Amino acid sequence: MAFTLELEQTLQSINPTIALPYWEYGMDLYLYSNWYDSPIFNSDWFGEASPITADHSIGDGGFWQGIKLPNGENYNDWSIQDSGSLNPFYNAYGLLRTPWNHNPSSYIGRSNKTYSDYGDSAMPSCRQLLDCFESDSTAEMNQCINGNTHGPVHILIGGAWGEGNTLDDDDISSLRSHYKPAGFKNLWRMGFTRCPDSCTVGESCSCKVPDEYIQTYGAKTILELALLNDTVSGDTDEIYLKYLRGYEDAAAVGDMFTSSAPYDPTFWSVHGASERLLDYKRILVTQGDVTDFDETWAYDRGDGRAIYLYGVCDWSNVKDSSDLTLPTCDMEQVCSGHFENDLLEFSNFLNNEDTYTNIEFYDFIHPWNDDLPYTYDTFDYDYCANEGMSFTSYTSSYKGNKNMK
């Protein structure tokens, strides 16, 4: 929420009456037959959910038609050895976009399908929101918010396309979904799939697992090292190779599904709903209605490890992108930025040069903090109550909703 607050205060420097809206996307599932029927996707709001233009750019004639990403020319001076990582800032077409995203268009891209799959085809349900709300700790709630509530919104709006015939084989039909780009990222960060530094529009551009790796390690071992073996259906060398080739390139991915998501206007309305859910839980804790919520700062994958991607990979022993030396990956490490005392990039919210670590910002955004410069209009989930799932009756002694379907 720190970047959302920074944007809001930037807008307020121009017009102090502005408040950044939040999108209660869970209500859309209750109100509309299809998630893309929400008025948020009207041309006078944030633009169409699934453009029919050839490059998947918004083409409805509204305010956001023609919105472009910057080029990445200011970020092309990069040393893999000095930084210990691949350049994360721009793609092979020189755009300020996730480096493995081979979308050549300079315009924001969206699709309501991930390859040929509609995914869950719905925004998070009241059941999912309530399960997240009933988390027993901040760590559990952090994971739930990321993966089960706000995460699917990014996937649904972003989508992916351009895979050609690489997923035609029914043996790997499960990869015609968000599992493919999600799994691809593991292969990429561990160096098993390699992507071109530059591409020309109109010519083939894709990432590939070098044959040398397959000959040396085998497809099964590579998938195991990348923690993707559980996604494989079958146990033959042929099947493992099909999956590895299916995973090796993400093709074109909608910006909301990637690190360039902030250039999509829907991005800035998504995160408030997650904070509002957490805020209501913290209010109940402060009032004494909930007594068993552990607010120790952490992330939890449910297996005792922290954060959502395992390990940290050091690329400093790799000369350049053409060097097939693998990075050194320590799968027990956690990426910096996620610990309670790691410093945030965003600051000065009280206009006194204030800075914040994760835990300090978590304390700062407590809904009963008198210094917090914003609050939410309500903490009402009446649309879920109409579905038989009540948030207002929740206390530590009453968790009857757990048994409701």
Image (cartoon, rainbow, N blue to C red):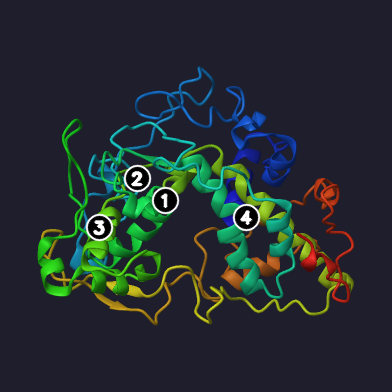
Is residue 157 placed above or below 332 in the rendered structure? above
Q: Are marks 4 and 1 in contact (CB under 8 Å)?
A: no
Is residue 55 placed above or below 373 in the rendered structure? above
Mark 1 → mark 3, Cα distance in angstroms: 28 Å
Question: Of residues 10 and 377, which is closer to you in this image?
Answer: 377
> Nearer the observer, disc 2 or disc 4?
4
Rendered image quadrant of residue 72: top left
Q: Are marks 3 and 2 in contact (CB under 8 Å)?
A: no
Is 47 on the left-hand or right-hand side of 134?
left
Q: Which residue is mark 4?
A: 149
> Nearer the observer, disc 4 or disc 3?
3
The amino acid at mark 1 is Ser
Mark 4 → mark 1, Cα distance in angstroms: 18 Å
- Residue 369 visible in this rendered orientation of the protein: no
- Residue 102 visible in this rendered orientation of the protein: yes
Q: Residue at x 50, y 41 (%)?
A: 118
The amino acid at mark 3 is Lys
Mark 3 → mark 2, Cα distance in angstroms: 28 Å
The amino acid at mark 4 is Thr
Q: Which residue is mark 1?
A: 259
Mark 2 → mark 4, Cα distance in angstroms: 24 Å
Question: Of residues 246 and 9, which is closer to you in this image?
Answer: 246
Q: Which residue is mark 2?
A: 97
**In which quadrant is the N terminus drawn?**
bottom right
Mark 4 → mark 3, Cα distance in angstroms: 31 Å
Q: Are marks 2 and 1 in contact (CB under 8 Å)?
A: yes
Residue 401 location, x and y as percent? Answer: 81, 64
Residue 242 — which label? 3
